[in-house]
Amino acid sequence: MISARTAAASPASLWKRGGQSEGGGSCDGCRTYRNTLRRAAAAKNSQLGWSHRDTNLSCFFHYPFYSWKWILSWNHIMLVEKYAEQSYFYISGYTLLRDPHHNKGLAFTEKERDAHHLRGLLPPAVVPQELQIKKIMHNLRQYQVPLQRYMAMMDLQERNERLFYKLLIDNVEELLPVVYTPTVGEACQNCLPSTYLIWTDHEVHSRGKVLEVLRNWPHRNIQVICVTDGERILGLGDLGSQGMGIPVGKLALYTALGGVRPSACLPITIDVGTNNEKLLNDEFYIGLRQKRATGEEYHELMEEFMAAVKQIYGEKVLIQFEDFANHNAFNLLAKYSKSHLVFNDDIQGTASVVLAGLLAALKVVGGTLAEHTYLFLGAGEAGTGIAELIALEISKQTSAPIEECRKKIWLVDSKGLIVDSRKNSVQSFKKPWAHEHEPLTTLYDAVQSIKPTVLIGTSGVGRTFTKEVVEAMASFNERPIIFSLSNPTSHSECTAEEAYNWTQGRVIFASGSPFDPVEYDGKVFVPGQSNNAYIFPGFGLGLVISGAIRVHEDMLLAASEALAAQATQENFDKGSIFPPFTNIRKISARIAAAVAAKAYELGLATRLPPPRDLVKYAQSCMYTPVYRNYR
């Protein structure tokens, strides 16, 4: 970070030379000062961006909100790197301790306590961040109930932001199931969401004030938005406004795993009501007490919301659609993918991480994607999204038409195998998977008839990979590939222990929720978790650092290939087809580099010229939650 004091000229002298004008023009003084800073930055091989707490105007001194007196009293310019944070802030005392962005708790040094009026407001001990982390982990491990750990973590996030993210990064394998799946689902059902969020409801929309609501958020330099309407939260169904825990958790992982600044992330719930009678009759429910808005009313709200986001935050803000019901998820993604930078993690993120798992599994079983046969239980967002990305990768590898590649992939929904005779009765997103075959109503019959080499569960219904189904897979596959992907754990199609026991330890297994290691015949297997957190943080970072304006399917393929390339023989020997989460920041940097490279290749990137080393550039752009020294 380059301080304004490092430049040759002072802000005051440049202000005097530049004079004052109305509006946001650029004067000679401002240009001189910016050029001075750029030369200083060049010496450190850094690229600077010019932003501001209230505007993106390039001329700091000419923004009318400021007066010369006001600038002089502050004494410093707030210099902001493109992907970093403000260098200076001006709070102290009790207010500083209540500010989660700058609070360090007992880590404030003696000098800082004197300089910022903290004497008497803290105990005398000075505790470094490392010791704070050790103490908090000790406390968290005392809780026997995961939900208690979740609540403690959320409380820490609202007290001390940097400590929260440092704790999560340093203990990611232990805490990831706490701050996200499976615990976050229980939290959505039982806990009130944080208040530091944005709710947009259709009552606001009726007055045309979505833009005004978004402007109430204090940060302007937003780079990633995670938005839900709460209709399909994990496998738990319609939770209305209680689903806000999902965007909050997702964005926490964008920061911890992908390095996107916390202040650049915005969680949003669009409350259009709920069809959950239990919530509607709950006196403590915080959302709108009415049935869900649908049809034209719903889509008008979404149009207003999307337009408002682009107007305030620009074209390069990533909008992640999260946990929308099938009938809206596909339509929203198709409608806005041509005009906005949009991403659906349930459709595209899940598909990308599963494809990565399959590419890694091929290193164990051999062959190519085109040589395998795939059977899905579940034909919703996740199932069809995964199937389509597999078909795209096969098409890329073989140069065969996508329609031909889809014939290797079969889907089973609640009514049985999707076949040609059902084509007129299934939803539009299922039609590409309706192949010629006799109707079959059970998964077992489909397995016996199609004889897949890969079985993937996205049904959201627990224990549907029964013993007879898994044993059938093992009967005609030496190394059956079985992915039980539904969340939370109670909805998983089978457990890791069941999969290993029923296949005599021959299965290549991955799950959506975490499972403990399994011992079979004297060997310990560490089941891999096909967790979207492998993909979306790095994917989002790649879009941000390249300034991408659209998401392209080739970016998803690039992310999958980058993740698969990082699975090693050591991982395979332990039974996992994914690299350990302990390396997730490095993994995310490589995924970000692959995505950014594809954005530049496709002409969808706007941050030019492209960096020479995208991996190092991605790492340099990552938010690092170590404490800063305050003067």
Image (spheres, rainbow, N blue to C red):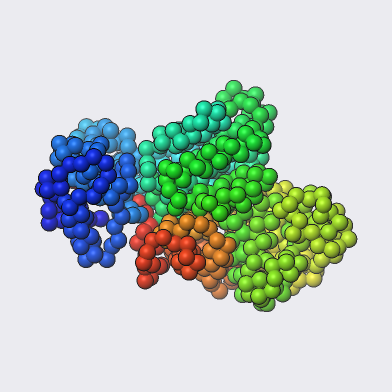
Image position of 162 (left or right of 573): left
| Spot occupied by residue 554 in the image (x, y as percentages of width and height) | 56, 65
Residue most extreme to the right? 438
Q: Is residue 527 left or right of residue 152?
A: right
* Residue at 21% over, 44% down: 61
In the picture, residue 593 is in which quadrant? Answer: bottom left
Residue 431 percent location from the top left of the image = 76, 56
Locate residue 13 relative to residue 199 in the image: left or right. left
Pick whichever, 9 or 249, lies toward us. 9
Give the residue at x 42% y 58%: 547
Please determine whether, in this image, residue 219 is positioned above or below residue 468. above
Image point (42%, 42%), residue name: 312
| Residue positioned 38% across, 67% down in the render | 610
Residue 194 vs residue 141, the one in the foreground:
194
The residue closer to the viewer here, 11 or 279, is 11
Residue 436 in the image, given as x and y percentages of width and height: 84, 63
**Residue 134 x, y percent position in the rendering:** 38, 49
Left or right relative to 191: residue 521: right
Q: Can you say whether 509 is above or below 115 in the image? A: below
User: Where's the N terminus, which quadrant?
Assistant: bottom left
Q: Is residue 37 above or below residue 235?
A: below
Residue 396 is at least partly visible in this image: yes
Residue 147 makes an appearance in the image: no
Picture mark count: 0
